[in-house]
Amino acid sequence: MAFTLPPLPYAHDALEPYIDTLTMQIHHGKHHQAYVDNLNKAITGTEHENKTLEQLVANAGKISPAVRNNGGGHWNHSFFWESLDEKAGGPPAGKLAEAIHAAFGTFEV
């Protein structure tokens, strides 16, 4: 199975001013793409060629360093992009807000 670079779930400029457009373009289009390309090279002609990314990561201790490092880099970056949200922000709510107020009295800096 050849792996591909997943598209970002938002535009490259959606996270500004916290992460600028150029940083997003380089990190997604160059760094993450390099993990994908190197993973594909590392699995070609091996028993890992038809495994999913999740199968590779779940067996990280049993695979070669090239597959482990590039598979892990691909998985981590994919998770990272999905963890960010252009609409996020504001004060915490729910149990997190309750815990902060119990420990510190306020969320204000």
Image: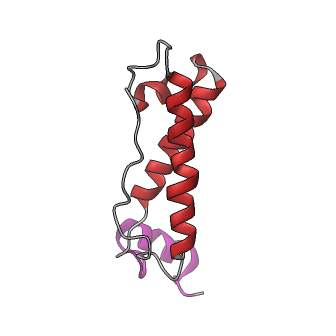
**Range covered by the magenta-colored residues:** 88-108
- The stretch drawn in magenta includes residue 89: yes
Nearer to the camera, 33 or 51? 33
- Front-most of 58 and 47? 47
Does residue 51 lie above or below 108 as drawn? above
Q: Nearer the viewer, residue 54 or 24?
A: 24
Residue 77, position in %: x, y?
50, 50
Q: Residue at x 50, y 57 (%)?
A: 29
Question: Residue 36 at what x, y percent from top left?
Answer: 50, 40
Q: How many marks?
A: 0
Quarter assignment of residue 27: bottom right
Q: Is residue 40 above or below residue 87?
A: above
Query: Which quarter of the image is occupied by the N terminus?
Result: top left
The quadrant the C terminus occupies is: bottom right
Residue 20, by quadrant, is bottom right
How far across and down, in percent of the image, does residue 14 sit? 40, 76
The coloring applied to the image is secondary structure
Q: Which residue is at the far right?
A: 65
Toward the bottom, the furthest residue is 108
Residue drawn at x 57%, y 62% is 26
Residue 2 lies in magenta, yes or no? no
Which residue ends up furthest to the top in the rendered image?
Answer: 47
Q: Position of residue 49 (x, y in %)?
A: 43, 20
Q: Residue at x 34, y 76 (%)?
A: 87
